[in-house]
Amino acid sequence: MTNYLATLIGSRACYDLISPIGAISNGVELMALTGGGGSQEMALTSDSAQNASARIRFFRVAFGAASAGQGIARREVLSVLSDIAQKGRISYQWEAEDDGSRTDVRSCFLILMCFETAKIHGGGLTVRRDGAGSTLTSLVDRFLLDYSLCQRLNGIGQRIKTSPAHMQFALLPRVLRKTECTLCTAQTTLTVSFGPD
């Protein structure tokens, strides 16, 4: 029940924040159209609002409630990833061709967040759909990921204290257990696969 309430809180917080941040972005655009948005300060405000909006949309999927049978359109996933990649250091390739279940996409987004912690100079992250399972691969030559966090993903090793920046490593295994999926990591290539048992 505690985990379910936490996801509802995440959904509600994101839902309530999306509209006002979107309004800020729209207001900045209107000011630019009327000649009042040419300053560096306005450009910074616009970039910040767009980045915040993109992150909240991403968090809404990753941390929000996902009911069994609930779907999410591929175009929405692509839109979220495209927005979050703008002016960022990581690019995303979503190679799944069809719409997906919200629980699967939620798991993918959490894994993407795990990968983000390993980036040194940026790179690319690819999601492929293989039958009933998914594979996520980091396309970067150099990465650094805490070994204890990898153990946490695989469900082995002692329980470790999780910082706010790494809470996705604690949440992901619980999400996968709830959906009766297993996860396999290969740290040498930074690849994660998951699917039904």
Image: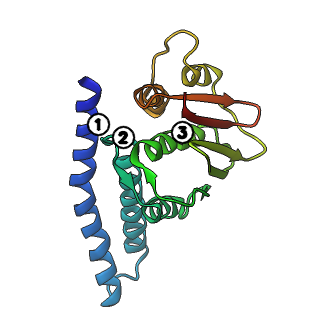
N-term-proximal mark, 1 vs 3? 1
Q: Residue furthest top?
A: 158
Which amino acid type is shown beneath numbered disc 1?
Thr
* Amino acid at pointer 2: Phe
Q: Position of residue 34 (x, y in %)?
A: 30, 90
In the rendered structure, which disc, 1 or 2, sits on the residue that comes first in sequence?
1
For label 2, count other residues whose C-alpha is less than 10 Å away and answer few (under 14), some (14-19) or many (20+).
many
> Looking at the figure, which quarter contains the C terminus?
top right
Give the spatial CA distance, label 1 vs label 2: 6 Å
Identify the mark nearer the N-term, 2 or 3: 2
Q: Are marks 1 and 2 in contact (CB under 8 Å)?
A: yes
Which residue carries the number 1 mark?
A: 7
- The residue at 46%/17% (across/down) is 161
Q: Image height check: is 75 above or below 17?
A: below
Residue 175: x and y in percent read 42, 31
Q: With 134 as the anchor, is 47 left or right in this view?
A: left
Q: Which mark is residue 111?
A: 3
Mark on residue 63? 2
Q: Residue 187, which numbered label?
A: none
Relative vertical location of residue 55 with respect to residue 195 in this rendering, above or below? below
Residue 35, relative to residue 100: is it above or below? below
Residue closest to the eye, 137 or 162: 137
Residue visible at 28% across and 62% down?
Answer: 21
Q: Residue at x 41, y 52 (%)?
A: 58
Please, what secondary structure does the residue beneath circle 2 have? helix
Determine the secondary structure under disc 3.
helix
